[in-house]
């Protein structure tokens, strides 16, 4: 038996897959809230890397507060323009000096944001369509202490915090997640008229799944109403096809349902994001750490993006609980729904949580006792390797939104 | 039977009160996230009132994006000072002109924020310890249309959105909520050394409730370590006494557990909020619409504070579902746990949700069928009066965080 | 003979009073540029005082860069309103820490600006009609050194800089200066309809003096066109009467000449300053150190307001040269025009300028040689007391714009 | 005889060249004040061009208020870095909509600034070392009217304003102007270690000219103290050689006199401008329209850079008076010093100034009457072509600082 306080038990509810109504949402990478998440996390990675390069360890910082103020745009078939630029303010705390050496945290944050935008919102011209500003203060006295001295060392929890992860994803969750990733991946590569601001809502009632896609079209690739209509239809067909790979249930896909062709009201943008016109955004208001918003499941309110991956328990536990759940489901048969909760204990190493709760809904014919030992072992193993989460986040291998 | 799509059914889980582990949190009104919530909501109320006064109806706006950048302070026994001011940016959309008349949205937002701060964070001197700036843009074309023409008219849902409410609160929830409200209410009136930044975490395991309070003390009322220690103890005793009114379980209260007297590290502030030193904040990152963060229960990710109460479905449904749950529990006996979910249908009046789900855990000896009709009737009645929510929010009678 | 390099000589031109054309301008204290000058100087005084109070000497700072971005207003007879607030950014350098103690430079600057505005632009409501923000950075390495250790010590010049002063003022200069001061003094006290944004232009051709006044009227004290017209006429009569005290020449006063009653285009404001609507401002763009803009005379381009009065040569020499010129003219008879120039020498104490040039136009019958010794003595005395300028500036007894 | 009010007369002073003491200064294009001037003027040109392209005429705008807040840098031999970025705020007024079409003034201003910086301060990396923000409001009601309808039309003066120009430049002036231009031109092309922040002060006493150069060196091209010393010496030799082309007087050139090698205090920068560390800047605080600061000559306080070249009298008259003076001196022999003053008359076309004053110091043997007719004719001709100034400014052929 592990010395860690691991509990494996049956959960007192149906698997989400078996519940009557299920709602799932994902805000695509070009959504204003996701832009903030993405910038916050890329700034975080850049600062971690800066500290590692300069002083050999990650110093205190927290950059989970980016605020985006929408611009004004005048989209037009064939190519419009941004009229008033988007304003993005990077906010947070960072250690600016170490043993007498000044550390370029402000300029590092700025260039990380610029590179992130260039890569992810390519139609947005930096220094014309968007202003990025930065306000990074010093942290509070208590937290300015150095940490992560030797990375193999497991840090102490400095807060009571909570993380929760789930596996496997339901069919609806898989569809919503995959649809956004594919649309913003292979599909967008072939179809530049599709902007990165793709918002996907999935609703399942019994065995009927409705997928609603709001897809920002990029005006320079759209010659007129017919081209727009065709582009919308292509997205509809693509998502429909994709959904069929994940489910045998009835699937109905609708794209840009708010359009009104009569009124000339369509989802046409110049830059591919609604941030260009009227939609503000900020960190932690959109997708949870697993990339989804899932009101049917317990969620942590913690913003994961931008937090320091060395010592922010909320971030680590949200990512780790998800990883544990996925590992368990991948390695242990007979699980229909698994929810892993990690609760920290102030002053205790984070690989020894106050509680590590694995709550399972087993498949028919499988008892919790049949799998308890296997699950416990995996949870134990993953907790022992908690610092891998930190490394993976710094290396950009783990997504946070 | 109502024409509304109301479902009353048993829920497939234990009442939260009966679950093994329960976690609850409340960020007090002086917490940086709550300051942002409070400003966002007070700006919203001020704009609603401005529009009503000037044009007789509420025009389009949304002010749910306030960002706070922490300052720097040098607290000291007997009275320290803020060294670098806190910076608060009010962000959102508002209609700036109506039928040729300019509407003072910027100056109205500013003065609402100033008044809110003066009232709620009294030790923070406006124009010395804090800068408040404002960026309110115009909304997107589609949304700039006027709405709320006649307030008795029920608006159409313009988005697929989701609200969820619960009742009754568990003992732990009641304690957490009451503790913050009482500390920031009667207690603070008598004990000015307690600042408004009070954060309360409740954790129940079985029948043992741990309440952890982080309470910012105001330095000008604290002469030294002894006075500080006494102030902490007073809070501990007060919360312990208060908890006993709500439960017969074992209760353990700890206050400012991170203090280290040896190191001189205590929770002493000049203004009563950690925003003065290192803690940033933003809207929608803290308490949900019912004032709590409850990972054991489904929560909506929507920020409620600052949203337009006339037509923002997420705001209306989060507040209304809570109100429905409370009404049902107040009027119908035999309910141990009730969860009300409202899901909107785009293009349908908001008093006719796509689904209105009342999921109950009944008390022993009570069947769902016994109470179904009563519950349905109350849900139906409350939905019919949906516009009361809007009025109540504008009048400041409903809290949103 | 003094050891100081003082030269007294005849100047190769007519006295300005005797030149054919003379132009003089003064921007009143409510003009956007003057608002910036005033804030910059009040912030400077507050920082000097802060440093003296806390560490016994003035540390390095420079706050001569306030920027004002105009707001939007909707003035109306009987009382209008500011629609979008004015934005003021205090910019500069300041020492933020001394021997381990943090110094509240940001909050001190903010409150100085707030108090200045409250006193000088009383109709402007802080925190509703105006936002004041602050960006004070650290200075460059070389300049961060402490100075002013013992105030009786004369600092070294750290720059080649130039100051110029004149006396006596011409009749036109006296009228322009007195008119603004009286209008914003006794007159405004009795006539609250006159705002502080009064701009006065004087032009003399031969013996004909034209005084043009642009006077912002405050709408809450003006009931309609007739009241406005009467207010304008009152100003015209007041300035005409005042001018007669200074000259026997022909004087013609015009007030608000750009008004067009037919078009309804008049100089009506809500706050008494054009900063409320469309007129931006910044430091050093308006009045010179003697309160006037005088193209007929050599002027220094240095912004005097906001500069550190302990060691900024440009500020000290501009103020001192004016004071020297005034002292000489007050004490020595027979001078029709006097111009005093001080040029610093890097690395030399500032009471020993590279050159101290007193250039005189004598009255008929007086030779330069007749007065040389007297003038030289006064210049020498004033230079010896150079540190009095610093003290007088810190105490707010010397105006800088 | 012209109908224009042109006066040609002798001036009551020595030619500046013949005065005993002369001071001249030029802030190079990389000086913080000049950066602001340059951005303001490039934004102005871009807006003029935008309006011409979109609506066929220049609409109301004014962008003469750019504010720069210095950053923090850590220069080092071989290449240092900017630690906290420079912040630049573009401030002004612009017409944002014309006949229902939105005009991209914000994004146009931003990209003009970015391009200006890229070209002129090449070592400054946009979006890492510098943040550029923009606040362009609408103008005041009266000024929002369109103007420049047909560009051949001469606009009316809307203000009493004053311009002054001089020719020929004195030897000292020529040296100061040429030294900066050559250093930032051919010299910098061959010597990338020299940054654009070159400040040149010329002081002549009798026949002795002292030229003091402050030249920011770029650290990535400087390996160590020896390289730095060599770079400083190269500049010294270059300027000395250049000066000899303009004068037979004794010339003494000093470069970076404030350096202290013992203390390791040298003028080393990462980006080639002191804006990276502690030197703030703003428009209109540096060079006058002719590129120089000349306390020996009357100067206008008006900021020329950033003003609207179609209707801003101050800008037009400062540029035109300089051009007139240069044309006269180029075409008419016998002039030792010429000062041209233009004074506007409100409500009169700007080619008919209230006064056009040409004040000459003739060479020995030449009387004013000998040249009066020629001078008058040239002044008249240039005034008739006043709109050429506007065109030349928009085309970027005229420098303004």
Image (cartoon, coloured by chain):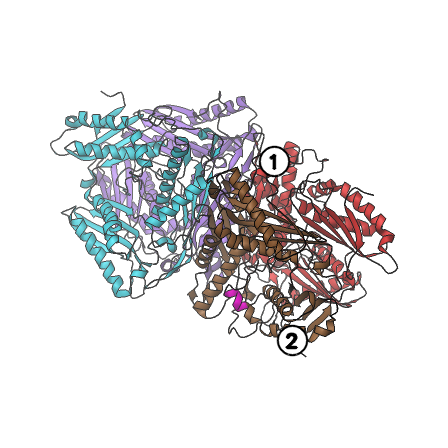
Chain colours: A brown, B red, C purple, D cyan
Q: Which quadrant would residue A295 be assigned to in this image? A: bottom right
Q: Judge whether D203 appears above or below D140 on screen.
A: below
Q: Residue under mark 2: which chain is it in?
A: A
Asked if labels 2 and 1 share a chain, the reply is: no
Q: Is residue B295 visible?
A: yes
Viewed as shown, does residue D162 lie left or right of A108?
left
Q: Which segment is the magenta one?
A: A390-401
Q: Which residue is mark 2?
A: A377
Q: Which quadrant would residue C179 be assigned to in this image? A: top left
Cα distance between the residues tagged 2 and 1: 59 Å
Q: Residue under mark 1: which chain is it in?
A: B
**Front one among B358 and D61:** B358
Give percent across and percent down for residue C110: 51, 49
Does residue A393 show up magenta in the picture?
yes
- The kind of secondary structure element at disc 1 is loop
Give percent across and percent down for residue B27: 66, 57
Q: On the rendered image, what quadrant is the N terminus of chain B found in?
A: top right
Q: Which residue is mark 1?
A: B145
């Amino acid at each position: 038996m592990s010395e860690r306080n691991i509990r494996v038990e049956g959960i007192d509810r149906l698997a989400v897959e078996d519940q009557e109504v299920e709602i799932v949402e994902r805000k695509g990478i070009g959504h204003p809230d996701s832009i903030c998440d993405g910038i916050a996390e890329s700034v975080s990675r850049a600062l971690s890397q800066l500290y590692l390069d300069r002083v050999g360890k990650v110093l205190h910082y927290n950059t989970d507060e980016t605020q985006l103020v929408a611009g004004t745009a005048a989209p037009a078939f064939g190519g419009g323009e941004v009229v008033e630029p988007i304003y993005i303010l990077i906010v947070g705390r960072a250690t600016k000096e170490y043993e007498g050496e000044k550390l370029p945290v402000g300029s590092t944050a700025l260039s990380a944001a610029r590179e992130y935008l260039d890569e992810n919102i390519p139609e947005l011209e930096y220094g014309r369509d968007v202003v990025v500003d930065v306000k990074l203060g010093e942290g509070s006295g208590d937290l300015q202490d150095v940490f992560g001295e030797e990375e193999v060392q497991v840090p102490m929890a400095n807060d009571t915090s909570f993380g929760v992860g789930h596996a496997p994803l339901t069919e609806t969750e898989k569809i919503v997640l995959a649809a956004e990733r594919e649309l913003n991946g292979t599909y967008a590569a072939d179809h530049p008229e599709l902007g990165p601001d793709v918002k996907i809502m999935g609703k399942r009632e019994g065995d009927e799944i409705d997928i609603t896609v709001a897809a920002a079209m990029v005006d320079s690739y759209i010659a007129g109403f017919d081209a727009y209509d065709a582009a919308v239809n292509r997205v509809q067909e693509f998502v429909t096809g994709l959904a069929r790979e994940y489910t045998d249930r009835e699937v109905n896909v609708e794209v840009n349902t708010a359009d009104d062709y009569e009124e000339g009201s369509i989802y046409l943008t110049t830059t591919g994001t609604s941030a260009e016109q009227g939609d503000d955004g900020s960190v932690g208001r959109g997708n949870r750490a697993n990339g989804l918003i899932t009101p049917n499941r317990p969620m942590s309110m913690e913003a994961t993006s931008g937090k320091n991956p060395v010592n922010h328990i909320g971030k680590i536990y949200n990512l780790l609980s998800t990883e544990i759940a996925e590992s368990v489901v991948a390695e242990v048969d007979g699980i229909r729904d698994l929810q892993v909760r990690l609760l920290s204990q102030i002053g205790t190493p984070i690989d020894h949580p106050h509680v590590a709760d694995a709550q399972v809904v087993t498949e028919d014919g499988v008892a919790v006792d049949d799998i308890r030992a296997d699950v416990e072992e995996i949870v134990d193993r993953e907790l022992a390797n908690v610092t891998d989460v930190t490394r993976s986040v710094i290396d950009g291998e783990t997504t946070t939104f």
